[in-house]
């Protein structure tokens, strides 16, 4: 399905000289003198007065150069007032009036729209906004351009059920790239939130995804473990709960006995179950190999509790394998 760009026909050319702060891409905006008072009211949380000043300006202004800034400020005011639908309308107007000559305004409009779409679970619109944003971010926004936005886009593909596209987008962010730009993150929370997006767990799902826990573990365990070990407490809790949930789901799928209609079918089923459970144990050991040394882990108790849970699952899996192997041996001897 073809995605229609939010920038659409308004973009004729994109200026390449945008230098946006990686702290906040809204930090370099210049406003005309008439809007400075509105900006003052916004900073002092008087959104009603701020909006009134901007609307008055829009009703009398004839200088089209400042329309993008005015609508961007209006969107920020309405967003601060928790009027997210009307904020989106203002940001769209900001993009319309800035596209082609002011990529800074275009990028900021898209960036702010993207967070509203994410908060309100409008993931199809979010996908479009993030795709457009990647094309207009400047060289001064390397963390947002090369890490945060691609990671959010990958997570968006995932929650929309586009598994292959999610993996492909995720692979555009290499470890070298992450290490190169991670120091530009606003703070540790931003950095580890990006890790959660890369693990497809940074956004609320709108429905149960069809992917098996084994696929999540295989593709996302390293990022989730990184957040569990070193992330801020709230993000670490979120990551460890995902890991625990997916390993438990994976194990629960392997535990039920598989009785066949014949002895031969039961024997074959039991051998397959032994193989699957052995693979599960191997994957637990692979996760252990990825752990940092204890003295380098920030969230030590959280990690100890999680790996104790994994150890309990591993021991139960080994017991089931032992019981199945004994049952196979008994069935085979009975056949003789």
Image (spheres, rainbow, N blue to C red):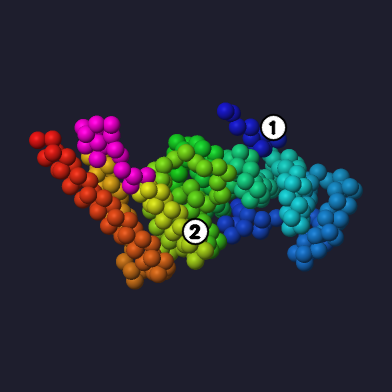
Q: Residue furthest top?
A: 1
As drawn, is 281 to the left or to the right of 242?
Answer: left
Q: Which portion, as a residue range, is magenta?
A: 253-270
Q: Please, is residue 32 above or below residue 133 in the view? A: below
As drawn, is 168 to the left or to the right of 102?
Answer: left
Q: Are marks 1 and 2 in contact (CB under 8 Å)?
A: no
Query: Quick check: is 130 in the magenta stretch?
Result: no
Residue wearing tag 2: 238
Q: Earlier in the sequence, mark 1 or mark 2?
A: 1
Local crowd at mark 1 within 10 Å, few (<14), some, or many (≥20)?
Answer: few
Q: Label 2's element?
A: helix
Q: Please, is residue 265 above or below residue 29 in the view? A: above
- Quadrant occupied by the N terminus: top right
Residue 167: x and y, percent?
44, 40
Q: Please, is residue 151 above or below residue 50 in the view? A: above
- 225 or 189: nearer the viewer: 225
Question: Is residue 137 shown to the viewer in this render?
Answer: yes
Residue wearing tag 1: 9
Residue 118: x and y, percent?
61, 48
Q: Label 1's element?
A: helix
Residue 108: x and y, percent?
66, 50
- Quadrant occupied by the C terminus: top left
Q: Nearer the viewer, mark 1 or mark 2?
A: 2
């Amino acid at each position: 399905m073809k995605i229609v760009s939010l920038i659409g026909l308004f973009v004729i050319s994109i200026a390449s000289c945008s230098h946006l702060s990686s702290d906040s891409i809204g930090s370099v905006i210049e406003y005309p003198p008439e809007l400075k008072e509105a900006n003052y009211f916004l900073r002092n949380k008087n959104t009603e007065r701020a909006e009134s000043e901007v609307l008055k300006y829009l009703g009398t202004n004839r200088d089209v150069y400042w329309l993008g800034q005015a609508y961007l400020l209006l969107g920020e005011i309405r967003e601060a007032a928790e009027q997210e639908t009307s904020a989106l309308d203002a940001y769209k107007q900001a993009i319309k009036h800035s596209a082609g000559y002011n990529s800074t305004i275009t990028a900021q409009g898209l960036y702010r729209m993207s967070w509203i779409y994410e908060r309100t679970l409008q993931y199809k619109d979010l996908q479009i906004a993030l795709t457009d944003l990647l094309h207009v971010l400047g060289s001064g926004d390397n963390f947002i351009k090369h890490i945060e936005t691609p990671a959010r886009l990958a997570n968006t593909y995932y929650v929309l059920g586009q598994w292959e596209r999610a993996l492909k987008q995720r692979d555009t962010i290499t470890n070298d790239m992450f290490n190169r730009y991670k120091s530009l993150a606003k703070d540790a929370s931003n950095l580890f939130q990006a890790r959660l997006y890369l693990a497809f767990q940074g956004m609320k799902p709108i429905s149960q995804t069809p992917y098996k826990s084994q696929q999540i573990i295989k593709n996302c365990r390293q990022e989730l473990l990184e957040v569990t070990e070193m992330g801020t407490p709230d993000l670490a809790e979120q990551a460890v709960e995902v890991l625990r949930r997916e390993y438990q789901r994976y194990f629960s799928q392997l535990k039920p006995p598989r009785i066949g209609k014949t002895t031969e079918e039961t024997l074959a089923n039991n051998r397959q179950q032994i193989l699957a459970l052995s693979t599960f144990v191997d994957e637990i050991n692979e996760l252990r190999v990825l752990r940092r040394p204890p003295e380098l882990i920030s969230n030590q108790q959280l990690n100890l509790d999680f790996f104790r849970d994994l150890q309990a699952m591993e021991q139960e899996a080994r017991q089931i394998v032992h019981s199945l192997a004994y049952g196979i041996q008994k069935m085979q001897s009975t056949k003789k």
